[in-house]
Image (cartoon, rainbow, N blue to C red):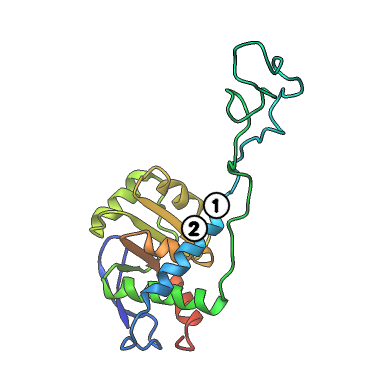
Amino acid sequence: MELSLKSIEGKDLGKIDFLSNIDLTNDINTSVVHECIVNYLANQRQGSANTKTRAEVSGGGKKPWKQKGTGRARSGSNSSPLWRHGGVVFGPKPRDYSYSIPEKKKRKGFLYALILKYKNDQIVAIDTFQNQNIEKTKQVAQILNQLNLLGRSLFVINEKQEKFIRATKNLPNVDLVYINNMNIYNIMNCEKLILDKKSIEFLNKKFEDGK
């Protein structure tokens, strides 16, 4: 596979190899991609929702009124779920939603996601973001226009670039991630995946075994 390499000004700089060892004739198992995304989202859940049972709400120690003779329904506690401010029956409690799937399946899902982006022409290869003096949001917006990037875009960088990171934060449809932290959800949640040259080399090395 090859990608057209461009400068941040949108000028063509030739071609660059991208996952050349991957056999594109094999079918993509989209169910694996879906399973990996569901796993990622489940692992991000805090699971902090909490309600109090009748044993945890305040009150409840004394019988509100005597059993008979008042004309009212009998009641044993003001912490009953039937009462206002009473306990909650079968309400949510803090829990861990995370679960694990095989590392080989995660790797395969990640690779399938990249291939899907490639086949849909949603990957943009940029030479470098380093030493470009990009430090303002206006400059990043100009880059998006020069590269004709519409919709949600994800910049993937290989090295720490504080000024460039700050410049992307105020753009609602722009995200940025380090190549080491990129995951399948990042890939599938954007319309354009923007990789710099070093990030592409990282991915080529990661999948040099062809799987």
Q: Position of residue 147 (x, y in %)?
A: 26, 60
Secondary structure at numbered mark 2: helix
Which residue in the protein does label 2 denote?
41
Mark 1, other Cα within 10 Å: few <14 / some 14–19 / many ≥20: few
Rendering coords of residue 75 (x, y %): 66, 22
Q: Secondary structure at mark 1?
A: loop
Toward which corner of the image does residue 136 lie, by quadrant? top left
User: On the picture, is 119 further left or further right than 85?
Assistant: left
Q: Residue at x 39, y 73 (%)?
A: 31
Residue at 56 percent across and 58 percent down: it is 43
Eyeballing the image, is 77 above or below 162?
Answer: above
Labelled pair 1, 2 in contact (Cβ < 8 Å): yes
Residue 200 at x, y = what percent?
42, 74
Q: Judge the density around disc 2: few (<14), some (14-19), many (≥20) Cα neighbours within 10 Å.
A: few
- Taking 75 as reference, is 122 above or below it? below
Kind of residue at badge 2: Leu
Residue 162 visible in image: yes
Q: Quadrant of residue 18?
A: bottom left
What amino acid type is highlighted by mark number 1? Answer: Arg
From this view, report whether residue 36 is shown above or below residue 160.
below
In this view, the residue in front, 197 or 32, is 32
Q: Position of residue 36 (x, y in %)?
A: 47, 68
Q: What residue sits right under mark 1 in the picture?
A: 45
Looking at the image, is 148 positioned above or below residue 103? above
Q: CA distance from mark 1 to mark 2?
A: 7 Å
Q: Residue at the spot x=70%, y=24% of the render?
A: 76
